[in-house]
Amino acid sequence: MNRYILSFTKQGFCIYTSHLDLLRLFKRAFKRCGIPLGYSQGYNPHPKMSFAQPLSLGYSAKDEILEFHLDKAMDTEEILRLMRAAMPMGITIAYCKELDIEPRSLASIVEGAKFKIGYPKSWDSLSGKAEGPEKIISDYLAQESIIAQKRQKKTKAMVDVDIKPMISFIKAIETPDYPFALEMNLRAGSDANLSPELVIKTFNDFAGLNVLREDIRVERENLYFQPCIPHTLGLHLDYEGEKK
């Protein structure tokens, strides 16, 4: 099968590299390293490689997954050594493993994603409220519905969408990186996909947080997959458990 995955982080100035440019970056890195990527058949062949889930421009990430095929089998440690040396500053490869599962792509079995939302000031400075963040988060999630405006792809019209069913959990966390931060699990994948932008907008409005969007940092910590792949791959499978 000669099918593999790479896990990598995306930090620094590389967060402003688009999804398509990141694909080009990896394609050229494979070529530079002499790693024989597999190609599709037909008039216009493409390298058989894809990300498990596209990452929005400006987001950092801790555990992104690239799936790819090779024309011939290679040792994963050799792939790891070669690719680490070819990456620019901001892209760090964590591991490489062979993917020995049914032909379904990882993109088709993504279920959810965990995000960390970093704010530039403390909760007290942002909200000016007597209640702590835990109470506000609880009240936010206790709403009968959480309505956000989302632009339709085809018509480009703005429509109201209830995003509450696609939020698994939200909690305030302590982090050395930000004065105040939220951690949240959201639905992701082909069946349902919730952008953290909609949660940030509706939560900030609900909580009355006085902060500009450009001052908020978003990091995708990991993706969750349907439990049809081996746990030994190191991928995150327990999305249902994370909901509890």
Image (cartoon, rainbow, N blue to C red):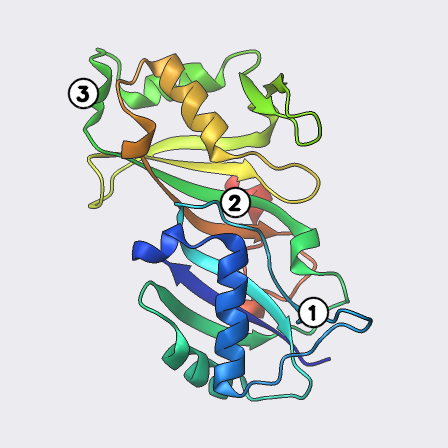
Q: Do the residues labelled 3 and 1 touch (CB within 8 Å)?
A: no
Q: Residues within 10 Å of mark 3 (few under 14, many from 20)?
A: some
Residue 106 relative to residue 185: left or right:
right
Residue 118, compared with residue 233, is above or below; it is above
Q: Give the distance between the C-alpha atoms of the residues marked 3 and 1, in whole angstroms.
A: 52 Å
- Work out whether residue 228 or residue 93 is closer to the camera in this orientation and state it: 93
Q: Residue 164 falls in which quadrant of the image?
A: top right
Q: Does dot 1 land on a helix, a strand or a loop? A: loop
Q: Does dot 2 land on a helix, a strand or a loop? A: strand
Give the residue type at disc 2: Ala
Residue 29 place in picture, x, y as percent: 48, 76
Disc 2 target residue:
113
Give the residue type at disc 1: His
Residue 239 place in picture, x, y as percent: 57, 45
The mark found on residue 124 in the picture is 3
Residue 102 relative to residue 15: left or right:
right
Q: Can residue 201 be seen in this view?
A: yes
Q: Residue 184 falls in which quadrant of the image?
A: top left
Disc 1 target residue:
46
Q: Quadrant of the N terminus?
A: bottom right
Lower sequence index among marks 3 and 1: 1
Residue 50 relative to residue 142: left or right:
right
- Work out whether residue 167 or residue 10 is closer to the camera in this orientation and state it: 10
Q: Which residue is drawn at 61% across and 37% down?
A: 193
Q: Which residue is drawn at 80% across and 73% down?
A: 41
